[in-house]
Image (cartoon, coloured by chain):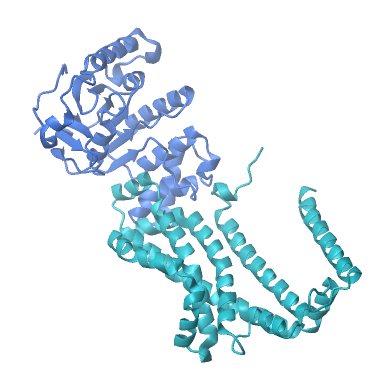
Chain colours: A cyan, B blue
Amino acid sequence: MKRLLDIMFPLAVALAVLGLWQWIVAAKQIPPYILPAPSAIGAALIQNWSSLAASMLATITVTLEGFAGAALAAIALAILFSQSRLAERALYPYAVILQVTPMVAIAPLILIWVGFEHIDRALALIAGMIAFFPILSNAAQGLKSTDFNLLDLTRLYGASRWQTLIKVQMPSALPALLTGLKIGGVIALIGEVTAEFAAGSGTASGLAWRIVESGNRLEIATLFAALSLLALTGILFFAALSLLEWALLRRWHESAIKKET
Amino acid sequence: MTNFMLDVTHLAKRFANGVEALADLSFTLNGGDFVSLLGPSGCGKSTALRIVAGLAPPDGGTVAFGAGKPETGFVFQEPTLMPWAGALANVRLPLDLKHVPRGEANDRAAAALARVGLAGFERARPRELSGGMKMRVSIARALVARPKLLLLDEPFAALDEITRAALNDDLLRLWREDGLTVLFVTHSVAESCFLSERVLVMTPRPGRLAADIALPRQSQRAPGFRLSPQFLECQAKVSDALGSSPVHGGEPAPDLIGGGLPRSGKTEGANAP
């Protein structure tokens, strides 16, 4: 019953807002090139479905590639930091610099270097660079926060570094790592959209480019349709990563356990 | 050579922040001993235990073992379990680290859990267990690799009195059954007297030995020892030694003690028979 209400209330709010929107557009006779009615947006979505779906797939694919690359690189670097204090001291400042530099600013450079003929590769690289740091910092933090006594225990039994990493440090780092992945996954999408904007005309084929294109043509209903699909993509990413987190932590971590009263 | 298991001489330790934890601690354990290391909090008894376990290097002094470093079990003040793993996997950790085949390791871990009264809880996660049960898992883990020497660092300090009494009885049983040598760190006079046959009383920081008190052997104690006048007598004796040890302020300033080196091998107020 409670779960049903959790779905019913937001749904009721959405219907009310859409109804109000539809009514205002009709009553005030707002032109469709300023604000199209929800019905017009729905019609545009259906009419352009095949091309919009292809764009959505392109955006999802590129974002996933960038995200997966960033996750692998960030986890590998976090493990290196956990094994070598020297490596952490030497490299961490550069990871921070990479993060605090607004990635939009180097997007044009990357597009030129990677080349417009490999536009998807360039977009994935930019998305990955943006997603990289939150995954790295959370994974490194997680690996560092292993219970000292557990580490002592592995020393007492003569464990190798590898055993300590696999048996104790990695599982300890899992909650923090998943938080990093959740943040990284969502901002990888932001990075991909930014990169598509930077790539400009005719080369990119994702949803962000469709937004620019529809805007230029004053096809605002199609713009809204693309925007809705972009929001849906973000929700899918977040939901998938939350599901992964729940699946991995539900048996033991406080954050994933429902408190019994 | 005597039949000593562990010989600690002139142990000294100073931390990086300048705190001198141990000044000069010497004692000997024989095989099969159950000895308590008793002292006020901050006297360096936990530090001494960590040095004996090889988890921290001493700044001075030596730790020698009669017959080579024995297999050692360690029980921390906290249960220190892996929250993601079930009780069986937690107990199995030492065997996993020693590359014991999985089947054998599972059998031995299950047997160790059964010995501490937790048969049937193999798959329970730490968060599903009470404080006392978690400590039992911790003890089972310390015993699973069949140690000769068992080191415990105030393991029952955070438990309620009823649980603590039950675990005290269990610990004595396991010590008897396995012929363990036990070094038990505590700040409870009653606990040290109930469990051990010898109590090493330490001074406040920097720790040194204030007294080495022999108590009646476990085999000579009547079943109702906990309520007997003999038990009170033991506690009075140990409390006396604890009370007469030099208090804070009576000791020289830490920076006057040269480099944490042992000043003398003499222990103050030692009255071991």
Instruction: Determine the residue positioned at 49% across, 84% down.
Output: A111
Give B251 or B104, whichever is nearer the viewer.
B251
Residue A51 image offset from top left, x and y in percent: 72, 85
Give x and y (percent) for residue B143.
36, 40
Q: Residue furthest right?
A: A27
On the image, which quarter does residue B44 sit in?
top left
The residue shown at (37%, 14%) is B225
Report the residue that reaches farthest toward the bottom: A117
Q: Residue furthest top?
A: B229
Residue at the spot 52% in from the left edge and 35% down from the top edge: B130
On the image, the x and y values in percent for residue A167 come to 40, 55
Specify the quadrant of the image occupied by residue B261.
top left
Specify whether A80 is left or right of A223: left
Q: Give the left or right position of residue B33, taking residue B264 as reference.
A: right
Residue B267 falls left or right of residue A80 = left
- A212 versus A7 height, above or below: below
Note whether residue A205 is visible.
Answer: yes
Tell me the residue at 81%/57% (across/down). A13
Q: Is residue A99 above or below residue A157?
A: below
Number of numbered tags placed on the structure image:
0
Q: Position of residue A199 (x, y in %)?
A: 56, 84
Q: Is residue B178 left or right of residue A245?
A: left
Res B1 quadrant in image: top left
Question: Taking the image as drawn, is residue B121 in sight?
Answer: no
Observer-nearest residue: B48 or B161?
B48
**Image quarter in which the C terminus of chain B is found:** top left
